[in-house]
Image (cartoon, rainbow, N blue to C red):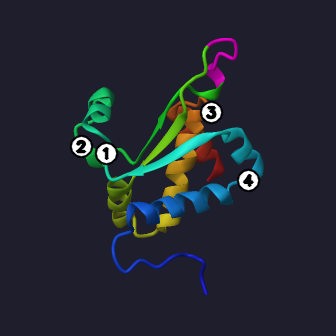
Amino acid sequence: MSDTPSFGTAPSLDDLAAVAQAAFQALPPAFRKLAGDVVFRVDDFPSEEVLDDLGIDDAFGLTGLYQGVDIGHRDTAGPAAGPSMIFLYRRPILDEWAEHGEITLEELVAHVLVHEIGHHMGLSDAQIHAIEAQAG
C-alpha cells in the first residue's frame, strides 16, 4: 500500500499544502535547516501584480515564487526583513502535472518547492538548473 494520497477530484488548496508539507519534511534535515523560517503558501494562481512584475502573460506560466530577501543578502545589523515566503500555485502545478504524466504530483511539488528554496538561499535560476542537471 502506498503512502501517496489518491485524489478522486483535483486536489484542493489544503490538499496541495499537505503535499508540500510532506515534501518539505522528506528533504534532508540539513537542507530543511538551511531553509530556516520560510512560510509556505498555496494559492490557485499568482496575482495580476506578480504576473505584471515578472512580465508573465499567462497565469499558468508560474508554478511557484520565492518572495523575500534571500539569506545571502540579509543585513543582520539593519531592520528585520519581512517574512520569507514560498508561494505554490495550485492550478499551474496541476496543469503541468497533467501534461507530464510520467511524474507524480508529489514529485512535481517537491521539485517546485526545492527550486523556490534555492531562490531563498540566493541561487539564480541558472544555478538551480545546473544543480538539477548534475543531480540527474
118 horizontally vs 28: left or right: left
Q: Secondary structure at mark 1?
A: helix
Q: Is residue 75 above or below residue 7?
A: above
Q: Amino acid at mark 2?
A: Asp
Identify the magenta region.
72-78
Please name the predominant secondary structure of the magenta segment in the image. loop
Tell me, yes or no, whether the two marked residues, 1 and 4, touch with CB atoms within 8 Å.
no
Between disc 1 and disc 3, whose residue precedes? 1
Quickly name the residue at label 3. Answer: 121
Q: Estimate the spatial distance between the alpha carbons at disc 1 and disc 3, rounded to whole Å.
A: 23 Å
Q: Which residue is mark 1?
A: 61
Q: Amino acid at mark 4?
A: Pro
Q: CA distance from mark 1 to mark 4?
A: 29 Å
* Residue drawn at the location 58% of the way across and 47% of the way down: 114
Q: Where is residue 52? Give x, y as percent.
A: 26, 30
Image depth: mark 1 or mark 3 in front: 3
Q: Which residue is mark 2?
A: 58
Q: State the CA–CA distance, disc 2 to disc 3.
A: 27 Å
The answer to whether the residue labelled 2 contacts the one labelled 1, judged by CB atoms less than 8 Å apart, is yes
Label 4 vs label 2: CA separation? Answer: 34 Å
Mark 4 sits on what residue?
28
- Comes first in the chain, label 4 or label 2: 4
What's the distance in space between the residues labelled 3 and 4, CA to CA?
15 Å
